[in-house]
Amino acid sequence: MTPPTRPPEDLIQRRPEGLYCPAGDFHIDPWRPVARAVITHAHADHARPGHGAYLAQRDGEALLRARLGEDIAFQGLAYGEPLRLGAVTLSLHPAGHVLGSAQVRVEHRGEVWVVSGDYFASGAGDHNPTCAPFEPVRCHTFITECTFGLPIYRWAAQAAVIDEIRAWWAGCAAEGRHALLMGYSLGKAQHLLAGLATAQAPGPVWVHGAVARLNAAYQASGVALPAAATVTAETDWKRQRGALVIAPPAVQGSAWARRLGPHRDAFASGWMRLRGARRRQGVDRGFVFSDHADWPGLLQAITATGAQRVIVTHGDEDALIRWLREQHGLQAETLATEFHDADTELPAAASTDSPPGAAP
């Protein structure tokens, strides 16, 4: 892109409330209450309650209302639809992470910044079938997540992982056990449901009530998720055979899980790439399955923006910054935020573990 005539201050700045655009007078995914919040997606660390007004991609409206309340002041934009706010032009572009997830493009006097939020770009070329796929946006400055910002994080083709899960599920059924598959209830659960509740399924699919509530928000937005029964207190598990139950990780070891009767459990997360994370999670199986960018995906996404300045948040920032500076000659720096890894619900310490097969 043509270099802009840079103003004396950054177009997007960190303030105590969160990321702020002075020229447009709005915040992006603020962590403290503000008058106007532009929201990248509905995960709890990016979409918080208490803001005066919410602006987000319109496909995510039902999810935001399900999480934050029906009475929030909401304004929706289509992907690519420009909106003038103060002295800037803002538009939202697909991030591929969950339904309605968006990158925020902000243009002011020829200078373009993009705030990615969380996004899914895989070196295997996959995309999440329950939302619009990630699209790189050309810009001068790119603020990127780096949850999995180390070269060890490389995702296998998701169709192959789905096949592994289906084979594990069939094995559970052959043993006379149910299969409890845990993953984050917003986004991951719907992605798993779409892949597993198919004609090749070895048994019926059930979902936890928290997953069912968010499934309803997806369906209200026009996403054709497969049908799945909802677990209730009256569910008679003795009458079920070979069931797969998709639930949030919080159910592990709970009375809710014990009511399933004989079962095996598994966890679906990018952190399952790490031996220590699998061990600490204490499940029968771990499946490497994520809706965040892996290392090749991060590099491809950043390169495709054409940005000469890259600002890295929440993750293994140091490794990615070093790579961008040394291998690509980019101006790369870190920015402290209060975003975290809502997708995994695993301790951050997991990111420091050795990968499977690595030397101790």
Image (tube, grey):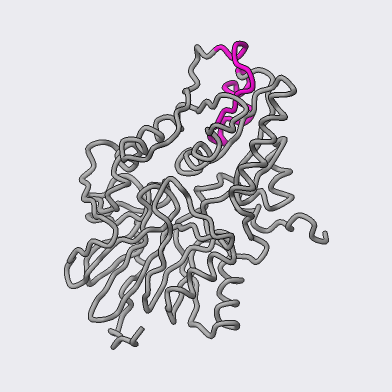
Hey, which quadrant is residue 39 in on the image? bottom left
From the viewer's perspective, is 248 left or right of 8? right
From the viewer's perspective, is 161 left or right of 140? right
**Residue 335 magenta-drawn?**
no
Hey, which quadrant is residue 117 in on the image? bottom left
Estimate the x, y position of residue 295 in percent, counting from the top left: 59, 65
**Residue 247 magenta-drawn?**
yes
- The residue at 37%/74% (across/down) is 138
Position of 101 relative to 141 (above/below): above
- The residue at 29%/80% (across/down) is 111
- The residue at 63%/46% (across/down) is 161
- The residue at 47%/23% (across/down) is 230
Quarter containing the C terminus: bottom right
Q: Nearer the viewer, residue 130 or 325?
A: 130
Q: Nearer the viewer, residue 199 or 29?
A: 199
Count of numbered labels shown in the rendering: 0
Quarter containing the N terminus: bottom left
Estimate the x, y position of residue 195 in percent, counting from the top left: 53, 40
Please provide the residue range marked out in magenta: 236-259
Position of 66 relative to 270 (above/below): above
From the viewer's perspective, is 340 left or right of 202? left
Position of 260 relative to 288 (above/below): above
From the viewer's perspective, is 200 left or right of 118? right
Estimate the x, y position of residue 214 in percent, counting from the top left: 40, 35
